[in-house]
Image: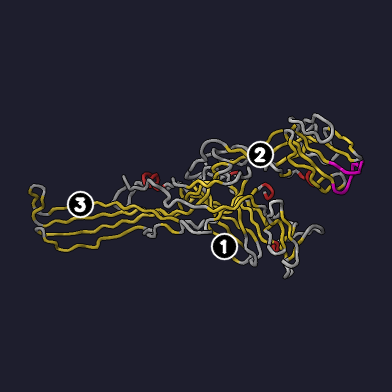
Amino acid sequence: MSFGLSIKNNNNEFLISSDMRNLHHHVTVTNPSISVVTNNYGGITRFTYTFTLDSSYIPVPFFTTPFTDRFYAIEKVSNSGNTWTVQLISSGGFPTTTDNGSNPSGGQLTLATDGPFYSKANTGISTSSSDKYFVIETPNSTSSTFTGTGKYTVVWNGVKIIDNVNITITNGVPQIFDGGGTASSDDNLYFPRENSNNVVPSTITDDPSATETISSSNYYFFRVVQQYYTVTSGSSGNQPSGSYGSAQIPKLIVFADARAVTGSETFGLKVFRNDGTAAFDNRKNPLIINQITSVSHPSNATNTFSGSGLSARNASGPVSTWSSQATPNQYNNISVNTMPTNQMFYYSTVTQVHQQVSRLEAEEECDGAEVKGNCIGSKRIYYWRSTYWNFYRGGIKRNSDTSVHAGYIGVEFGAYHSRTLDSSFFGVSTGGSSGSTVGKWPWDSGQINTAGTGVNTLIIADATNYI
């Protein structure tokens, strides 16, 4: 570019450029409508989110994955004017246990805390191996009502998790004393705490564990709490009825380009393109991406859909056998960089696959005499055929900190059956009948979009700054 602004990191990657539009946090939606379509065939839950965004801009929705034993995918994004709707699907029916934050189910990503702690072996910013504390610095000031730019540092087990970061302080109240915690280099959140009570200090002089003056600056040391994510053991379950707790509902985190940012702040950084429209606006948190990778899915969703034990007559199942065979069990393992502990994904599924199996049966009726097992005279042969089918969409599942599984979610199913009649007299055919056909016909197209360059893109980012 011949003019403009370009900011890169140490890896020569663009952070801000007047030639490109940054994506910024628009809204986080936590209250979707929820529909469990079925808990058969691996189960499917559909979450429907709505939000408002000027229709001139296109939303980019990320989602969290509360359960680590389920597949998730964005199924549909649509709008009516400025009202947008996003449908997110997951495998599984209702969880076995309903969790609103204190009673997690199996296979669930949950919040946990450690602390509060205060340990500091030496004066100043000490980094002995057992040190844990939260410190606020007011430079060149001894006033408890300091107003200006201060700094804060968090030390955990002797490591500066957050190191000398600028922060606005107004009348002795730092911005981080709002109770929201502060993100760190280890993807956890850290909170300051009073020395005597497990609460956020109201000001820099509200019950610190220690104070020190170093080179005319005041340092206020507080206890520190670490908030982190952990995965519970066991299975989330797959129930036909029940409910989802607030901690088990995926959060939809929506981003839009800088032109959609609104705010009342009177200072900050705003970068414009050469056409005068916004490219970056720090009034809303920019999207920070950890990794972009391509995802490939197996050619089949299940390798057990044999039809064994299913009835040829009237497509009568049994459903339990059909469900067991058609439950998706195939996936590809995708190696990724170490993910944040509270990761979010962008994955808009286009991968689809159809699988079906047919069962056949014939029965002979003899109106004449049977001689040594042969029908002498007129006879009829009834042919039954039942076809059972399932339709799947691709989904992704967090397997570990460095691995994602690309598998399938069953989104539609059906069966149809037919009966035909063939008649004969003394071995001479007297004609057949088309019989009857009843049921829901399948998608008969095999694999659709199971492969293709650029159509299965997975973006991984840290949700901590946006929820």
Q: Give the range drawn in magenta.
A: 137-149
Q: What residue type is labelled 2?
A: Tyr
Which residue is identified by label 1? 78
Q: Which one is earlier in the sequence, the residue at label 3 or at label 1?
A: 1
Circle 3 SS class: strand
Please state, as top left, top right, bottom left or bottom right, where the N terminus lies in the image: bottom right
Q: Distance between the residues labelled 3 and 1?
A: 51 Å
Hey, what amino acid is under mark 3? Glu
Dots 1 and 2: beta carbons under 8 Å? no
Q: Nearer the viewer, residue 359 or 292?
A: 292
Which structural element holds mark 2?
strand
Rendered location of residue 144, percent (x, y): 90, 41
Q: Give the CA distance from mark 3 to mark 2.
A: 65 Å
Indicate which disc, 3 or 2, sits on the residue closer to the N terminus: 2
Q: Which amino acid does label 1 sit on?
A: Ser
Image coords of residue 355 (percent x, y): 39, 53
| Mark linked to residue 228 | 2
418 vs 193, nearest the viewer: 193
Residue 57 percent coordinates (x, y): 64, 65
Farthest-out residue, bottom: 275
Residue at x 50% of width, y 58% of height: 350
| Residue 387 disc label | none
Report crowding for label 2: few under 14, some 14 to 19, many 20 or more residues within 10 A (C-alpha): some
Q: Does the magenta stretch include residue 241?
A: no
Query: Is residue 40 shown to the viewer in this render?
Result: no
Instruction: Report the residue marked by disc 3.
Output: 363
Distance from the alpha carbon under mark 1 to that under mark 2: 34 Å
Report crowding for label 1: few under 14, some 14 to 19, many 20 or more residues within 10 A (C-alpha).
Answer: few
Q: Which of marks 3 and 1 is in front?
A: 1
- For residue 13, above or below residue 404: below
Badge 1 marks a residue whose secondary structure is strand
Q: Nearer the viewer, mark 3 or mark 2?
A: 2
